[in-house]
Image (cartoon, rainbow, N blue to C red):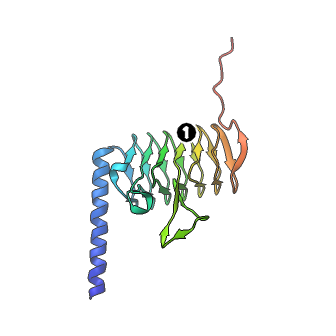
Amino acid sequence: MINLIKAFRQKTRHYISDLKMRAYIEDHFPGTVIEEGVQIKGELEHLKLGKKVIIQKGTAINLGGFEWCQNTGWLEIGDYSVLSPYCVVYAAGPGGIRIGQNFDCGPGVGIFASRSDYIMGSSAGTERHIFEPVQIGDGVIIFSNAVISPGVTVGDGAVIAACAAVTKSVPPNSMVGGTPAKIIRQSVRPQPSRPSS
C-alpha cells in the first residue's frame, strides 16, 4: 500500500510539473507545439523559442540550473524549427545552445553543451564537466541519431548525415558524416541562379 501511495504521489508531481511547463510555454511562446512526453528540466526562464517551433514526442531538454552545471544553462531555438521525436538537448552550462531559424532536426539527435571530463575523472566523489557553447545556424538539417558535441559551431545551411558524431565545427553549406564527422560534400545547397544579361 505504501508503494502504491508513493507511485501515485510521484505521478501526480510529474503531471503537475508537465501542466506548469505547458502553461508557461503557451503563455510565453504562443504558436509553439509541444507534443506528449516532452521533458524540460531546469528553469523555464532559460528557454527562448521563436515563432512556430515544434518539439515532438519524447524529446528531453535540460536547461541547466543545477549544481553540477554551475547553476547555469540556456537554450534558444529560432523561428519555424523542428525537433523530431526522442531528441536529447543538454543546454546546461554557461555557454548554452543557440539554434537558428528553419532548423530541421531528425529523430534521436543529441546536442550537448557539456560533457563529463573523462581525463580528469571524478575527484572526492564530485563529477567534473566541460562546458562549451553550441551554435547552430539557420537552415541546418541534422539527420537521425547524429550527435553534436560541446564547442561545435554548425554553419548556415549545413547538413549533418545520420549517425554522424560531430566533434569539430562545420562550415556553412557543407555536408558532414561519419565518426568522427568529416566533410563529405561542399556547396550542398544550390546557389540562386542569376538572370542572364
The extreme front residue here reads 124
The extreme top residue here reads 197
The one nearer the camera, 6 or 134, is 134
For the point 57% across and 49% down, which residue is it? 151
**Residue on which disc 1 sits:** 139
Type of residue at label 1?
Gly
Q: Please say if 78 is above or below 115.
A: above
The one nearer the camera, 54 or 12, is 12
The extreme right residue here reads 184
Secondary structure type for disc 1: loop
The picture places residue 173, in percent across and down from the top left corner, at: 64, 37
The one nearer the camera, 138 or 93, is 93
Q: Please say if 66 is above or below 166.
A: below
For the point 69% across and 57% down, which residue is it? 179
Q: Quadrant of residue 53?
A: top left
Q: Is residue 66 left or right of residue 82?
A: left
Q: Quadrant of residue 187?
A: top right
Q: Inspect this view and state whether residue 57 appears.
A: no
Looking at the rendering, in which quadrant would you find the N terminus?
A: bottom left
The extreme bottom residue here reads 1
Q: Inspect this view and state whether residue 118 appears.
A: yes
The picture places residue 102, in percent across and down from the top left corner, at: 50, 40
Q: Please say if 158 is above or below 74.
A: above
Tally of numbered tags: 1
The picture places residue 42, in percent across and down from the top left corner, at: 37, 58
Looking at the rendering, in which quadrant would you find the C terminus?
A: top right
The picture places residue 50, in percent across and down from the top left corner, at: 40, 41
